[in-house]
Amino acid sequence: MMCQIDPYTSCKNGGQCIPIDEHMATETKFTCICPKYFTGDRCEIADTKIILSFQNDITLSRSMIVHFIQVLDYSSHERATTVKTIPIEKNSLIIYWSRPFHIVLFEFFNKTYYLTVVQKRYNPSQVIVKTLNSSDRCKHISEVFNETIVNLHLLRRIKYYHLPCQKHSSYLSCFYDDIHFCLCNTSSQHQHVANCFEFDHNLKPDCFGQNSCENGAQCFQDSPTCAPTSMCTCPTCFYGRRCQFSTNGFGLSIDAILGYHILPNVSIVKQPYVVDSHDHAGLFSGVLSVIMFQSKKLCEAGCDLYLLISFITTVFTVILVALKLWILVLAQMALTTNRSFLGL
């Protein structure tokens, strides 16, 4: 077996080697299941890493849409979209992306766009550090043209699109209308011109008709066809990998606290520490109660009955919490197929 003969050189960066059936008519003897942030036939390509920070004059929203645009030729392009959430009390974000791209646009949910990355050639495994400021915001045509030009028909209006790039080249990097997105570039003659391409501002987030999200959640995937990854953006009071869980009718429940920490299709021993350590504090408290219950001085003081009741209550509570957690873990890990009892 190829994986057994050469387990260290077959797959790189900790990839899992899976041998291919020797009876299959293929030259490939194995395939690699790559870990997170690595791709390629042998997991040899690291994902592009974008380290993004925001200046204080930018009003941030809790989540933002990221558009990756790949220029295929002079007349067409391919767009992939994902959603990222900024951690609480932070103004920075790290994004990993495995597919080729030439343009990166950040879109806040109020339809505000920021031009983040523009590159003529795509170089894989690069690290891009960018600080977004107000000058990176892409303006609507109503902000760069007067009302007369804005009200013109598109065929007559678009011939004026090079003027803002020439007049405001120092602070205008991009602008858009209802159909196009335009970048202010410098031509070979060192002139500032508008390079425009079609951009659907109302693209339906349903993974191009392959939406597996539940409860009205939005679905985003990293490629229009044969997408390797997709994600769900849950509405209020829903969570989970597919937004299949609800917090309606609950207060500070285990579902809401630990739901996002449980990894699907991963064994319990490889789950995050927060998942398998929830009841350690309760068990520790119960053990302390037992130790204190052995003290004769406390028994003489009349505390023995109190400690006994406290111990029984603690153990009973821990058992109930552990049972609830295990039901949640098994359901989230996709080991439970009949989930109707979860709503009871």
Image: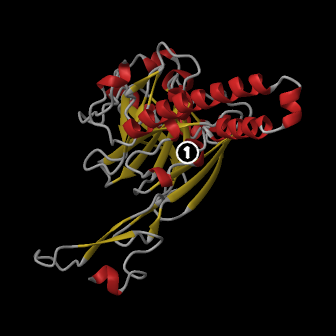
Q: Position of residue 284 (x, y in %)?
A: 70, 41
Residue at horizontal 22 percent and vertical 77 percent from the top: 28
Residue at horizontal 45 percent and vertical 37 percent from the top: 326
**Vertical order, 147 against 20 (above or below):** above
Res 309 visible: yes
Closer to the camera in the image, 280 or 298: 298
- Can you tell which quarter of the image residue 280 is in? top right
Q: How many marks?
A: 1
Q: In the orientation shown, which residue stands out farthest toward the bottom?
A: 5
Closer to the camera in the image, 26 or 48: 26
Q: What quarter of the picture does the N terminus occupy?
A: bottom left
Q: How is the image coloured?
A: secondary structure
Q: In the orientation shown, which residue stands out farthest toward the top?
A: 249
Q: Secondary structure at mark 1?
A: helix
Residue at horizontal 34 percent and vertical 41 percent from the top: 334
Closer to the camera in the image, 169 or 198: 198
Q: Position of residue 30 (x, y in %)?
A: 27, 75
Res 55 visible: no
Residue 239 in the figure: left or right of residue 300: left
Residue at horizontal 49 percent and vertical 54 percent from the top: 269
- Can you tell which quarter of the image residue 340 is in? top left
Residue 10 in the figure: left or right of residue 312: left
- Neighbor class of circle 1 (other Cα within 10 Å; few <14, some 14-19, many 20+) is some
Residue 271 in the figure: left or right of residue 152: right
- Type of residue at label 1? Asp
Q: Position of residue 204 (x, y in %)?
A: 32, 28
Q: Position of residue 211 (x, y in %)?
A: 28, 33
Q: What quarter of the picture does the C terminus occupy?
A: top left
**Vertical order, 183 against 20 (above or below):** above
**Vertical order, 267 against 173 (above or below):** below
Q: Which residue is mark 1?
A: 276
